[in-house]
Image (cartoon, helix red, strand yellow):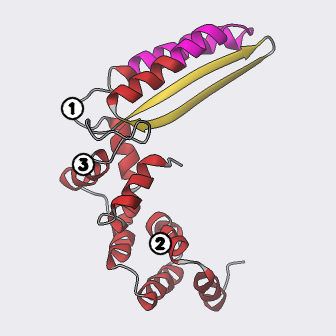
Amino acid sequence: MEPSIDELRKNYERFDDNKLIRLASEEATRLRPEALELLKQIIKERGLSTDVLTGIEAQFKQPDEKSLRVYTDLLRKQSCPICDSTAQPLNATMVASVMSFIVFTHYKKELVIGCPDCLDKQNNNAMLKSALMGWWSLPWGLIRTPKSLMLNSKMKKQNHNYEANDLFKSFTLQRIGRIEANKNNPEQLQLIVKHIR
């Protein structure tokens, strides 16, 4: 059973500003229409930045190529979450690693945001770890280790793209509401690339 508007208002009023902004900038499309209108009303009542309301609207629009590039560029200008450098624009890579222990194989694949040099290091470390520790289980170690090595090798080729690669564009597209709500807040933009979830 869905909560009533009065119950929603009580919940929203208990939220601190950061939680309210996060709900508005990340989950607006999941809210039912009356809950969304209530959320907008409470944001206005609290006097929060109008960028938060713009972030809500951005989630309901499919950005064109030009708009996506603007959002992508905002994130790419942030300092590297790994080494803290701003010398190179950020990009994204997929890092895969395998560890095997006779009857158990652990395969881990994760998205990493960083400068091209740090991304290369992440891929290299995963390849080394997989090459040393991935083979020692039948059959999955023998299957997943080459898969991991090939994926990391393929990803390394995209780390130094001048333009944002497709992984970074996809990462940006999924966070347009947060980016729009925080476009004038460099600290929050940095958190977007630092804490991937």
- Characterize the local packing of mark 1: few (<14), some (14-19) or many (20 or more) Cα atoms within 10 angstroms: few
* Cα distance in 3D space between marks 2 and 1: 33 Å
Based on the displayed image, in which of its 4 quarters is residue 109 positioned? Answer: top right
In depth, the one of 178 and 31 nearer the eye is 178
Q: Which residue is mark 2?
A: 21
Number of marks in the image?
Answer: 3
Check whether the beta carbons of the residues at disc 2 and disc 1 lie within 8 A of each other: no
Q: Residue at image x 59%, y 14%? A: 130
Q: x, y (%) of residue 77? A: 27, 47
Above or below: residue 74 compared with residue 15: above
- Characterize the local packing of mark 3: few (<14), some (14-19) or many (20 or more) Cα atoms within 10 angstroms: some
Image-based side of 5 in relation to 50, left or right: right
Q: Amino acid at mark 2?
A: Ile
Q: Which residue is mark 3?
A: 73
For the record, the magenta segment spans 126-154
Residue 137 is a magenta residue: yes
In depth, the one of 62 and 154 nearer the eye is 154
Q: x, y (%) of residue 58? A: 33, 66
* Cα distance in 3D space between marks 3 and 1: 12 Å
Q: Amino acid at mark 1?
A: Tyr
Q: x, y (%) of residue 152? A: 46, 19
In depth, the one of 94 and 49 nearer the eye is 49
Q: Residue at image x 74%, y 8%? A: 138
Q: Which residue is mark 1?
A: 162
